[in-house]
Structure formats: structure tokens, C-alpha cells
């Protein structure tokens, strides 16, 4: 896991459904300060700009 905040919380983003993700974002607002992308069903937290470009294009 790249995000220290997510790792510290012991979260596995791929195992969370939408309601659980929202609950965690409300509970831990610092998670919102990072881009969270869902592409082809896979959750990417704080991807590097070059990785975003590769994933999207």
C-alpha cells in the first residue's frame, strides 16, 4: 500500500464497498486529501501522476 494513512488504518481499499469507503472518508478526512481512483473495478489511492496518465489513456 502506497498511502501511509491507509496502511496505518489497516485498510484494504480493494475489499471495501462504496458505503464502507464513504464511512472511512467521513471518519478519516485526511483520506480525502489524496486522489482515489477506481478504474476497471480496481481502487488506486494516491497514484503518481505518470501512473494516472497510464491508467486513463
Image (cartoon, helix red, strand yellow):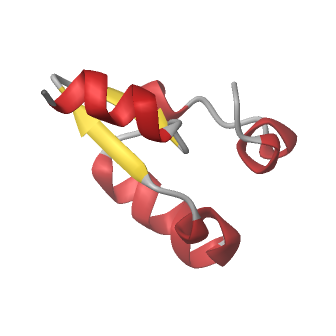
Task: Tell me which residue sits at (34%, 58%) in the image.
Answer: 19
Residue 17 vs residue 33, the one in the foreground: 33
User: Up-down: is 34 above or below 48?
Assistant: below
Residue displayed at 41% across by 65% down: 22
Name the spot of residue 42 as percent of width and height, x first: 31, 23
Instruction: From the viewer's side, name the closer residue of 51 and 24.
Output: 51
Residue 55: x %, y % from top left: 25, 24
Q: Is residue 18 left or right of residue 56?
A: right
Where residue 50 sits: x, y (%)?
Answer: 43, 31
Quarter of the rendering occupied by the N terminus: top right
Residue at 45% in and 41% down = 49
Quadrant of res 28: bottom right
Residue 6: quarter of image: top right
Q: Is residue 22 left or right of residue 32?
A: left
Count the marks: how many? 0
What residue lies at 79% left-to-right and 35% top-to-bottom? 7
Quadrant of image for the C terminus: top left
Front residue (pair 33, 56): 56
Q: Quadrant of residue 39?
A: top left
Residue 18 in picture, x, y percent from top left: 30, 51
Amino acid at each position: 500500500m502506497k498511502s501511509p494513512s491507509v496502511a496505518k488504518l489497516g485498510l484494504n481499499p480493494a475489499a471495501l464497498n462504496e458505503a464502507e469507503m464513504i464511512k472511512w472518508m467521513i471518519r478519516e478526512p485526511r483520506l480525502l486529501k489524496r486522489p482515489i481512483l477506481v478504474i476497471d473495478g480496481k481502487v488506486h489511492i494516491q497514484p503518481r501522476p505518470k501512473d494516472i496518465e497510464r491508467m486513463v489513456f
